[in-house]
Image (cartoon, rainbow, N blue to C red):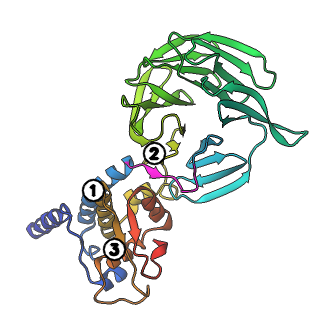
Amino acid sequence: MKKLNLLFTSLLLFFATNTTISMEPHDQLKKDPYESLPSELQHIIRWSVLENAITFLSQQPINLPKECKFSHEITLDLDHDDVMITNNTRKTWNIMTGELKQMIEAPKDIPYIKHTYGSLDILKWDNDDHIYKPIFALDKSKPCAINKNIIAFADRPYSHTIHIINADTGKNIDTFQADQPIETLALSDDTLLASSTMPTMQVWNLKTRDSQILRPKMQVIKTKFHDDKALVIEQHADLRADHGTLQLWNIHTGTLLKTIPEFRYKYGDVHIAFNNRWAIALSSVDKKAWSLLPLQGTVHENPLVWITENANILQGNLIRRICQATSDDNTFMLALPEKLGVIKEDESQEQKDGRIYFTLPYAVRAYLRNCLRIKGRVTLPLAQTI
């Protein structure tokens, strides 16, 4: 028992440092050098290696695919773990792996907002002429929001008056008066939200007309609803800054649930969306997804759950060092040997790390690439698959 405790202490001290594992290449392919240790000790060592990495990954945003490009004319939406961008077509990507899952013709029954110079048009598909036609036009400076075929808009910039109309008929459904000058609007099936420059957010129940005031710290420039929650972008005090804060509010209780800092954008040029699992922001300068429930799901659908439950000590140590490099704003380099099945005694540490990296499932590797700073040595064959 005394020898076991000494071994345990030595191993913990080793893994508490940033020292890389230096092993002979054949050991990395043939067996786990820790498999001869008692299972309880393996579990303790494994978790000591992984704990900080799991915490870091659960807070780390995921980069959306490069093909997810910002435009004023797109709509951004979410379905479970997938992000959808709709314009003339609807493209669907898995958030964690970046895999393009579907590309279909855009649905024709939903109006969408098109920004043009000096104006803002709401268009709907015309089945007779087979083109999108404007059904409603606004001065671009007027706040507005759309939900299905219902439109909310202010009659002028910084007005107190909000009109609700039916996009199909153009008829006025209701009118609301805000306590403060209106900066932005958001609309759902049963809720209307108006933010002002004060800063305040006034929220109405469309059925009862009851309202309440939410008080963010800074001016809110964008809002999106899902169920009883609102995702908002709070502008920093310095209007020249290219970053703000994403906040998640419960609109029924007026409670701030979560703050997601440092998303980069140009003022007003940003789309946001969220569901119970993800918050997404897509701007002209950045595009990211934040997991609201990072450890929810099974090992088959969530790579972070796979890492938590299945990664061995070698894999865990590699992931820990990649997380540390990303945290230090460095890029972690990986490489492969010239021939995958041929082992050389003089392999570099990058090649040894590459061997461990490729023992991870594809979905886990894709997830790590999307949220950490990993790069392959492109001068070596097969390295482009990293």
Within-10-Å neighbours for mark 1: few <14, some 14–19, many 20+: few
Looking at the rendered structure, the kind of residue marked 3 is: Asp
Vertical side of 172 occupied by 12: above or below: below
* Label 3: which secondary element: helix
Q: Is residue 82 left or right of residue 196?
A: right
**Split into 4 quadrants, where in the image is the N terminus?**
bottom left
Residue matched to label 2: 291
The CA span between labels 1 and 3 is 19 Å
Under circle 2, the secondary element is strand
Binning the other alpha carbons within 10 Å of mark 3 as few (below 14), some (14 to 19) or many (20 upward) gives many
Image quarter for residue 335?
bottom left
Q: Position of residue 12 (x, y in %)?
A: 17, 62
Residue 307 at x, y percent in the picture: 39, 60
Q: Name the residue tied to disc 3.
A: 353
Mark 1 = which residue? 328
Disc 3 from disc 2: Cα separation: 27 Å
Residue at (37% x, 46% y) in the render:
59
Amino acid found under the numbered disc labelled 2: Ser
**Disc number lying in front (2 or 1):** 1
Magenta-highlighted residues: 60-69
